Amino acid sequence: MFKDIMKFIEVNLPVLIKILGFPGLTFILIFLIFAVWYQRKYLARLMTRMGPVHAGKVLGWLQLIADALKLLTKEIIIPRESMRKIFVLSAGTLSVIPATAITLIPFAKDFAIFPIRGYTLPLFLAIMTLYPIFVVLMGWAANNKFTIIGAFRSIYLDVAGEIPLILSTIGVMIWAGTYDIQDIIEAQKSIWFVFPQLLGFIVFLVSFMAMIEKVPFDIPEAEAELVFGYKTEFSGALFLDSMLGDYVNLLAWSLLMITLYFGGYLGPSITGDPIIDGSIWTLIKLVIVVTMTFTIMISYARLRIDQAIRVGWNYLIPLAILNIILTIFVKYVILGGG
Amino acid sequence: MRDMMSYRYHPFNEIVELEGGLFQLNMGPQHPISGQGRFIVITDGEIVYSIEMDIGYSHRGIEKILEYRNLMQGIVPIERMVMLDTSNIAMGYVLAVEKLYGVDVPPRAQYIRTIIMELNRIISHLYALGLYSESAGWNPAIFLWTTADREPILDILEMITGARWSYSFFIPGGVRADLPRGVKERILTTLDYLENRIRVYEDSWIYNETFRMRTEGMGVLPRSKAIEWGAAGPNLRVSGVPYDTRKNEPYAAYDELDFKIVTHTAGDSYYRGWARVEEIKVSIDIIRQAIENIPEGRIRVALPPKPVQEEALARVETGRGELNVYMYTEGRDKPYRVKISPPSFRNFYVIEQLPKIQTIRLADVPPLIYSFDPWFLDADR
Amino acid sequence: MTKKNFVSRIVTPFFVVLKHVVNQPVTHKYPFERLKGFSRTRGLITLDMDACIGCGACGWICPDHAIEMKIVESSKVTHPAIDFLKCSFCGMCVEICPRNALDMHPIVEIAGTEYKNLVYYPEKLRQAPNLKELLPMLKYELEPVITPSKMSYIRKKVG
């Protein structure tokens, strides 16, 4: 039995390294730590103050570990009238969906965890559509009237945000002429798609902020009558779980943005090895996109739910459809197809 | 609605279900957005039917304390009444005592008082802008910028008076000390810095599309209702009533300075925020004029031994509106009764009456309340 | 930049916020950095026992009733004891003293662990003969501002 396990590991070693190490589980957890630290320091800098400086001299990185340890030692309170098993299990399921979708994205040429070719972009979008189901599950399991209202508001927002997002990716797919993520990246060798698809990028950016639920679309988190929307009743380690889900969602959509519009892993070579090069460029672009997200997060006020839905249906969807029409026109009529 | 009166005796749960599908929310003293007060909001989930303010959490009995203090000693407790705007309120008390004794304050003291009061007005408006933007759902960027911008002004005030907010500087008969050497250049540098920062606030806060979407057209206070319900301060002026105590009954060198009142005709929450930024600009203008034209002379006169009248009424314009101080002494050195009528108390009445003439949604309640700049310490005394 | 333009109303806040990255943070790491004060900052009150005549005017004028006159063995008159838990540092006692025996210094770190340590009996209020001796207690860096008026709280010690 032990020999069988050893043989299994030996045969599948590269895939196991990819799943458990980079760009898999370890990368996601390190990204969580980095994103929380970066958010606290960078946002503090924009507000003309410093973030945590005391724990872990100068950079304050030990502060996160201290906060995580504090959360782990707090008591987990499960409301009496909730559905207990689903309540405990649903806290962590939110992070499974985006993590599954991340396996499809190549960090360097032929270096995705799941290196299939074919229809990976629609598959990615289809996996991410399952996210609202688990939001409702979290809100429902707590059996609190106001968390359910918060969860439903999150679904209104998700619907109003996801449709323009998918429509703008259709524009990219038409322009590149392929469904495969790696082919889309390779087709950006001459010019990044953010320039010919500028209208689509703007639509994608606004609906991206709606999908990851940050200001100005912060609505389910801070505006429901109770304090925290559908994540209210989780405390202690379960709160860490729901925070993990939030940041993995951010990671998945940011990776999609950089593959579709900013050229993925392409870039001038630093070291000779293509895998390390691609990974370095992906990480640099990821940090820039996360910085831009945080700056947008702090510059605007929070919209009401009806205003946010109005933005989605009245402005974003027509613009996305206009983008598709313009793309078809330019590519097939002016540039002669291909 | 009569059976809804029983909610007052209900224990402090966060949400109470009433009949007819209505809920009562207690945005209580432990809430991320309330100050030191409680808002009782009756709603059906989307539209608000009534807002009621429950104040009294920070009542300290200032009016009673003043009955046990000398007319000179009284300047110390009264500036603990409102901690942001202290010199305007101290001015009200000092003005009332000077009317009792019939003294003529030397002009240099009046100019120094004007400078300090206008600096206080800038501080108070900056803080109000920060709280307003935080209640509209910003990550506290604007709040922290305005709090950081108050630091140079607090440094100037510490240079002149010796403390950051509890100045004890205005005394019946004048001011306690003269301006130190080197403060004029410092004030002018700080005013230039503030003008740059006002431009930053305009670009990123007032002319911000999401902020306009959130507050424009919400909570409109019509002109007739503003006069009937007794709004105070910039809330009144934005509804089309050009009433400012600094122009109507000038005190302390305001009659020699040239400034304009900020008015507007739309009475909604967006313009209440706009008006405060414009008033900061007007205050900067006033301070520049006062610093240039300050006369030489004494800064303090002695009070005569016996008062001339027995009662006096003084009106001043604080950052929130007009404040009245009525003092009745029976000819002795401790007052028999001091009555202070603060502006925030009157603004709370306006907030309570607004849901009756307008539809207000639940999500709009925090920006609406904070656009009136309520300061619970002011209302509770 | 035109502010009435719809596009600039959405885009301008982003760049205005982004420009704040280069601003200096205003955080003051207090116990590890010294505070900044001014020479007029109102703080600790000290007493010159030789000049004090025991008239009690400081106790009469104090708005917080924080001064009590106490008997001291080595002297013929009573001297004030200040309760710093009640004192609001207004400086009226310093102004009214007819012999200028009380003096105010910009020392604001007057904390203690027991109540009775904060009631400064007259011996404890003794004035240091020299401002330089107070410097180890002085966590403030003073800004040199000279006041020309007679009614100031601080008398600069030359020495």
Image (cartoon, coloured by chain):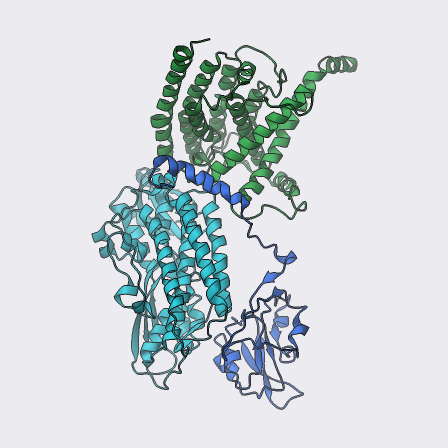
Chain colours: A green, B cyan, C blue
* Residue sitting at the far right: A3
* Residue sitting at the far bottom: C76
Q: Reply above or below: B247 against A294.
A: below
Using residue A25 as the reference point, say whether residue B268 is left or right of it: left
- Residue B197 visible: yes
Residue C7 at x, y percent in the picture: 37, 34
Residue at 60% in and 61% down: C35
- Name which quarter of the figure residue B65 lies in: bottom left
Who is closer to the viewer here, C28 or C146? Answer: C146
Q: Reply above or below: B221 against B159.
A: above
Q: Reply above or below: C9 against B262.
A: above
Question: Image quadrant for the C terminus of chain C?
Answer: bottom right
Who is closer to the viewer here, B377 or A314? Answer: A314
- Residue B165 visible: no
Question: Image quadrant for the N terminus of chain C?
Answer: top left
Residue B245 at x, y percent in the picture: 29, 64
Residue at 42% in and 43% down: B204
Who is closer to the viewer here, B370 or C98? Answer: C98
Residue A222 at x, y percent in the picture: 45, 39
Residue B216 at x, y percent in the picture: 31, 42
- Name which quarter of the figure residue B83 lies in: bottom left
